[in-house]
Image (cartoon, coloured by chain):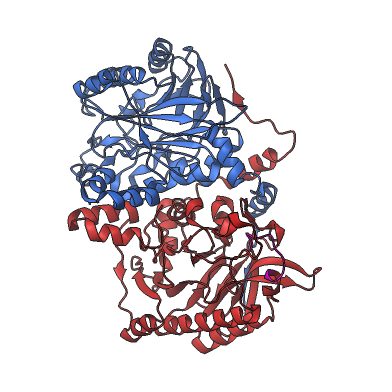
Chain colours: A red, B blue
Amino acid sequence: MADAEWKSLEECLEKHLPLPDLQEVKRVLYGKELRKLDLPREAFEAASREDFELQGYAFEAAEEQLRRPRIVHVGLVQNRTPLPADAPVAEQVSALHRRIKAIVEVAAMCGVNIICFQEAWTMPFAFCTREKLPWTEFAESAEDGPTTRFCQKLAKNHDMVVVSPILERDSEHGDVLWNTAVVISNSGAVLGKTRKNHIPRVGDFNESTYYMEGNLGHPVFQTQFGRISVNICYGRHHPLNWLMYSINGAEIIFNPSATIGALSESLWPIEARNAAIANHCFTCAINRVGTVNVFLCSFKAHQDFGYFYGSSYVAAPDGSRTPGLSRSQDGLLVAKLDLNLCQQVNDVWNFKMTGRYEMYARELAEAVKPNYRPTIVKE
Amino acid sequence: MADAEWKSLEECLEKHLPLPDLQEVKRVLYGKELRKLDLPREAFEAASREDFELQGYAFEAAEEQLRRPRIVHVGLVQNRTPLPADAPVAEQVSALHRRIKAIVEVAAMCGVNIICFQEAWTMPFAFCTREKLPWTEFAESAEDGPTTRFCQKLAKNHDMVVVSPILERDSEHGDVLWNTAVVISNSGAVLGKTRKNHIPRVGDFNESTYYMEGNLGHPVFQTQFGRISVNICYGRHHPLNWLMYSINGAEIIFNPSATIGALSESLWPIEARNAAIANHCFTCAINRVGTVNVFLCSFKAHQDFGYFYGSSYVAAPDGSRTPGLSRSQDGLLVAKLDLNLCQQVNDVWNFKMTGRYEMYARELAEAVKPNYRPTIVKE
């Protein structure tokens, strides 16, 4: 399996394929080739200075007579944890705040309206360890923890909606932990929060050691720039999770994730993109990048946990998608969306209109009964 | 957009990428490179004589202690209509029967246990026309029409389960038409039928001119070789349709389709493969190939209907997939599956266990109510 040296699928194809073939490959793989955004030079300079990748692409929609284009710029951030996982907790959090502040400043130069960070962005991804301290110390109040206050400042300073996925400590309900995304309006106000609905029990990823399935349903956040939802990590494997956000009106669904190569790299380009197609919405898949030894125990088998392969991307309701960010480097992906595309594709394909949800609500309600007998036709 | 000359994505990648890069591209795109099946020489010779492509791949599963491997060979057939669409109906049907017989004989040489033909395989894809005669004359009884009897002979002769998607005339319920797949046991008995659950209303593809949404739910057919279902064509866009077949126990879901390049070619590699991943099952996506002028009216705009791009493929529960058959040629794709892989992947990823279907049954039942108000959080 490729290590970090193999930068990305797209770079490899660009390097080796002759132009007419490259165009066909991109059409089959990505729907079409998206226009690159003309981002400001100082943004590229700052990204280079801060050592992260910056890419920008535009999705276009047809002109309409009665609606103006509904343009929104989204920003997806993937980043390593700057300090080792055994550094003091407060120092790790501060270093991450500084790193994200630098990236958000570049996003602001690029006109980003809504930005989303990676899953549990204020900490190393330690849920694989089953160890409690010090990892549980990274948990914060969603409403007024230091990270939320930090993000409120960013949001207000840059007139930017901030989606901040953190480990939440819920002091009003038995001090339990949740895997939560806080949504902060561009005014700086906390708009609300949403929780990870599906919790993995896959190998080292049994995160139910720390938190359970979210209890906030499928809320949609009406921002000044469009209606957004957050499907956290493992929820991307569950088509019904995407569907309910979409039925509730989400036009952009962010999917902040943390997933490693051996487990999921070939699934990664499929699932969020299928969700964009199936639900007539934009999806933004964000993965961590790099590797960090989070195991403080001495269990040797666990020193090499695996490689977070980055490759964050945006997919559109027409099935097109951006290339992925690098597999190995911190990055900011800027995408210019025209949200009119959602309704336009909806009107072409009509998956909601033809979805027969009454039938499925009924069939699912039957299927979950302990005495359910499926229709199996035998000779 | 590529015409028929551009044979396939895979051929293009094989031609231009150096080996180490090709391996990485295949890993990211396809999960892994599958072993090619060692099919008999006489099968390749017969395929070449009959002018169709023959490809074969093997999916493997881990060895278990208590279960033996559950090996099944599936065959996917994509083919042009041999005669022009204005030839007499009976001649068109006979020519298709002959063509399929020749392909099935090669499938038998390859040890195929279950074979599936393309959607409405006994006719040109004329549902785009909105014309009734002669197209409605292609409809037959699912239980004892000439095509079902033809398939019963094939099934019995070759000890092969046959999935035969046809236009059905239901004489016991008002003589209405359905888009139906007949499932015939390897004994030659008609095991049952299943109907297309989702009917497109997309441009020329408004097939509700001919038939409506299926009323048979999501049956699964227990064959000697494994439990199968048939998700016909447009149902592949609906994740809930795949899900219900899977909840009812399907290990292999066939998706006989008819779809054209401009509309869906970039969606094609995504949807059936996502369904295999999301449902821990094998999916078999079959598309027509070629183009035929089915418009008997003089409406000029409609002479060029579009190009059926073939590219039939099999996807596995672990996210891996075969290359696609050609975009331009008739073909038979043979895949050797070990059905043990379904439960093995289920036990790793646990999407059913973590699916929270009770919650979704409840949420969907609410969401379909006319007075439903979704949770939208505003500032």
* Residue sitting farthest toward the bottom: A157
Q: Residue at x 30, y 43 (%)?
A: B260
Residue A102 relative to residue B65: left or right: left
Q: Nearer the viewer, residue B140 or B362?
A: B362
Residue A41 covered by magenta stretch? no
Number of marks in the rendered image: 0
Say whether residue A371 is left or right of residue B148: right
Q: Is residue A133 magenta?
A: yes
**Closer to the camera in the image, B328 or A10:** A10
Bounds of the magenta segment: A127-135
Magenta: main secondary structure equals: loop
How far across and down, in percent of the image, does residue A227 sit? 53, 69
| Rendering quarter of residue B284 | top left
Residue situated furthest right in the rendering: A174
Q: Residue at x 39, y 43 (%)?
A: B206
Q: Identify the residue shown where x is 33% and y is 55%.
A: A31
| Residue A172 place in picture, x, y as percent | 79, 73
Question: Is A107 placed left or right of B95 in the picture?
Answer: right
The relative height of residue A160 versus residue B288 in the rendered view (above or below) is below
Q: Is residue A297 above or below residue A352?
A: below
Image spot of residue B292 (x, y percent): 23, 35
Regarding residue B360, the answer to whether it shows in the image is yes
Quadrant of residue B103 in the image? top left
Q: Nearer the viewer, residue B192 or A161?
A: A161
Residue B303 placement (x, y as % from top left): 21, 42
Placement of the C terminus of chain A among the 4 image quadrants: top right
Rendered position, A49 above or below A354: below
